[in-house]
Every structure is written in C-alpha cells, then in structure tokens.
Image (cartoon, helix red, strand yellow):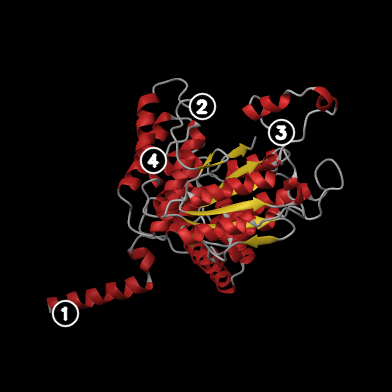
Amino acid sequence: MLNGLKRCLFKALLVFAVLYPAAVFQLPAQSKELKRAALDLKKAVGREDPELFLESFVAVLDTGERRAIKTAVDAYVSMAKVLGSEVETSGEYYYLHSKAANAFKDAKGKYVTTEIEKLRKNKRGDWRGRLLILDAACFKSDLDLEAACIEALSDKAPQIVRRALHYLRRSKKVPVVEKMVARYVGIETKRPSGDAAEWERTLLTFQASLQQMLHVDLPAAVDWKNYVEARKGRPDFFEPHKKASARTALTLFGAAVTGKNICFILDVSGSMLSTDPAPRGSTEANRRRTVVGDAAKKGPPKPPEERRRITRAKKELIRVVKALPSDVRFNLVTYSSDVDPWQEAMVKSSKGNKTEAGKYVDELRAEGVTVTDLALEEAFSDLSLDTIYLVTDGAPTHVGSSGKGDPEDSAQIVDEIHKRMKELNFLRDVRIFTLGFRGAKEKFLKQLSREHGGRYVAIE
C-alpha cells in the first residue's frame, strides 16, 4: 500500500512539473506581454526582417522580466546566424548588432544587470550571444566594461578576444597592458583549438592594439613582453619611444609589411604621373640645388623620372612582392576610373606568382580618376583578407577635379568609405595601412588607418 501511495505521489508531481514547470524550478512565469514579444521575435527571424526583429527585441527588453534578457539574446543569436557575415549581408549584420547592443541602454528592471552578468560568464553558449553582451556593457553604466573585456581575453572564441581588444586599446593602465601581453604570449606560444586563420587574425589584432597604445612597433609577443617588463614603471610608458621600434624586416615605403593574407591596393590614376622633388636634406636634393650659369636663370631643374610617383610605387611594390615570405598569400588591386584585381583571390607567394605579379605591376599605366571606395570594396570581397596596404596620392572621386581643391564628390565618398568599412570590417578586424604621396587626402587616410588597426605613412 505504501509503495502504491509513493507511485501515486510521484505521478502527481510529474504531472504538476509538466503543467507548471516555472513553479517547480522556481522560475517566474512568462507574462502574456513577454510571450507576445517573443513570438514576434521568432517571426522576425523566420522572415529575416531586421526592422521587425529590432522592434520586437526592444519590446522583449521593455517587459523588464527576468527571462527577457536571455530570450532577447537567444533570438539575436538566431537572427545573426541567418544574416551571416558575408560581404553581401555585412551591412545588415552590423546594423542589427549595433542597434541590439544599444537597446540595452534603456533596458529597465531589477534583473537586467544580474542576468547580463550571468550570460556573460556562460562560456558554453554561442559566441554571438557573448559578443552582444560584451557590447551591451558599453551602453550600461552599471556594468564594468573594462573588467568584462579583460575576462573576455580568455574566451575560446577569437571574435570575442578581438572585440575585447577593440575596447582595451583605449586604456592607459599598465595592468591592462600586462594582461593583454600575457594573453598575446599565451596564444602565440600555444594556439587555441578552432579556426587557425581566425586566431592568426587575432594575433595581428594584439599587435595592432599594442602598437596603438604604446607607439612602438615590435615583431613578436615575447618582444612586447620584454618591452613592457623593462618600461612599465616609467612615467612616460605610454609616450612614443624613439629607440623602441625593433623591426628590420620587410617594409613598404617605411611601413612594416606583416600579415598572412595581404592585399596591396595601388592608385594608378592620372595624378600618379606627377613627379615630386627629392626630400630636403637628401643627397639627391643637395646635388640638384647647386646650379650655375644659364641653368640658374631657368630655375631649378625638374625632378627626374625616378621621382615620378607611379614609377616609385611600381618599383617599391615589385621589390616588396619579390621579398614576401613563402607562408604569405597575397593579391594586388589597382584602380583609377575602374578597379582591376590581379587575381580573383589570394595566391601563394611562390616564385612563379611573384614573377607574374611583378610583370603585372611593371606594365601598369597611370590615367583616370580615383575610385578608392570601389577598390577597398574589391579587396574586402576576399574573406581570407587580414591586411591592406593602400598606396595613393589623391582624394577619392568618381568625377575628378576641375581645378585646385578636392573634387566635388570627394567629401561624400569619404564619408561613405568610413561607414562601409565599419560594416565590412565588423568582426573581421582587417588592418588597413595607408601610404600617401604629396597631395593625398591625409585626414581621410589617417582616420582610415587609425580606425582599422593600421598606420599612416607620408611618402617623401
């Protein structure tokens, strides 16, 4: 009889658990409002409709319920997977992510902070959810973004590590630098499991972040470790240090050539036919400064052919391509009024490919306008890309210039480039190095390189 009562009691509890799971597990039941908003989220994912999704996403957060945060984040993961990170949908993905992360700013309710922290510390979920939570911390004043980013350095997803570096590179705290360097050394010493290319890209992001913070250029993680250990107690730790840059490797017009999947973008517009005087103080400049007799009356002689921009750019690019290490893949994209990629995708830096690339560069001729935006778009179409070197001498334009000053469409194109690069480079962290001849739109080039982990070099 006792066993019969136990069986009856067990069945009763089982039925109760099925009918009222929230009560058994002490979870708050969903309100009709949350159920309705969650259903709309599901519909938006099925329709691949970002606008409906974001409207429903905000509605879920506005309920202020404990389940709301996880419901919203799980739905975001589903929507992010639907959109993907291909070039064709990168704009929609960036828009979705930015708006969703920003929505947490106005999220109210006593559970918001604790539920966000709980999800952030759950490393078993999809990395896209942790990415959203990390960026949400940027908008919630009661969340410690720096602490979240330091913890994210140890994440198993390279995308999360790179996103953390995006925030930490703004810090002026020695302990933050030390934690970054420690993780950098750890990854370089023993690569984590997963996509090798993504972790290689992450190492480049560590390098770019530390360069931006400490204003030095060092080749390997151990070099950064030694540098930080030697200088961390100095008051000028975050100031440029002239003797610290220890790179003696391959350079393009003075910019260190690094990366494993490199695209060299070369401006071959008509302005590249211009010749520049030799740098002041150089041997060539001093030799050409002294003129006598009739030659002096005619003024200083014109710069020689070797000072022509297109000639110099071609010579330098051929030299660099010839010296690329065997483990590097590369491509060339040239542009003027049109864009001309040398290959459809990256190729190995074999002897044969280097020779063919050299022939391609040697035959280039300068003419036309400067469609920089289209050239960058072409480079980003290769998803393996991790580094760009852009060599140019003018302002982006589709119509050209009718006189002095920038072309009439230049300002708009520059704004569009900055916006598009943020979309295309979201989560990819491609480094963009810009190199400008005299007359190049320096403000644009400096901002482009600064925002994307590279540096600007003025070509003398």
The image shows residue 217 at horizontal and vertical percentages of: 47, 35
Labels 2 and 1: the sequence-earlier one: 1
Labels 4 and 1: the sequence-earlier one: 1
Q: Between marks 2 and 1, how big is the CA–CA gap? A: 81 Å
Q: Is residue 391 left or right of residue 162?
A: right
Mark 4 surroundings: few (<14), some (14-19) or many (≥20) residues within 10 A: some
At a point 72% along the width and 24% down the height, the residue shown is: 289
Q: In this picture, is 424 found above or below 187? A: below
Q: Mark 3 points at which residue?
A: 277
Q: Mark 4 points at which residue?
A: 220
Q: What residue type is labelled 4?
A: Ala
Residue in front for this viewpoint, 420 or 35: 420
Q: Which amino acid does label 1 sit on?
A: Gly
Q: In this view, does 25 lie to the left or right of 260?
A: left
Residue in front for this viewpoint, 248 or 97: 248
Q: Name the residue under label 2.
A: 240
Residue in front for this viewpoint, 410 or 309: 309
Q: Which amino acid does label 3 sit on?
A: Pro
Helix, strand or loop at mark 4: loop
Helix, strand or loop at mark 2: loop
The image shows residue 447 at horizontal and vertical percentages of: 64, 41
Quarter occupied by residue 123: bottom left
Q: Between marks 4 and 1, how big is the CA–CA gap? A: 72 Å
Nearer the observer: mark 2 or 3; the answer is 3
Q: Mark 1 points at which residue?
A: 4
Any part of residue 184 in sight:
yes
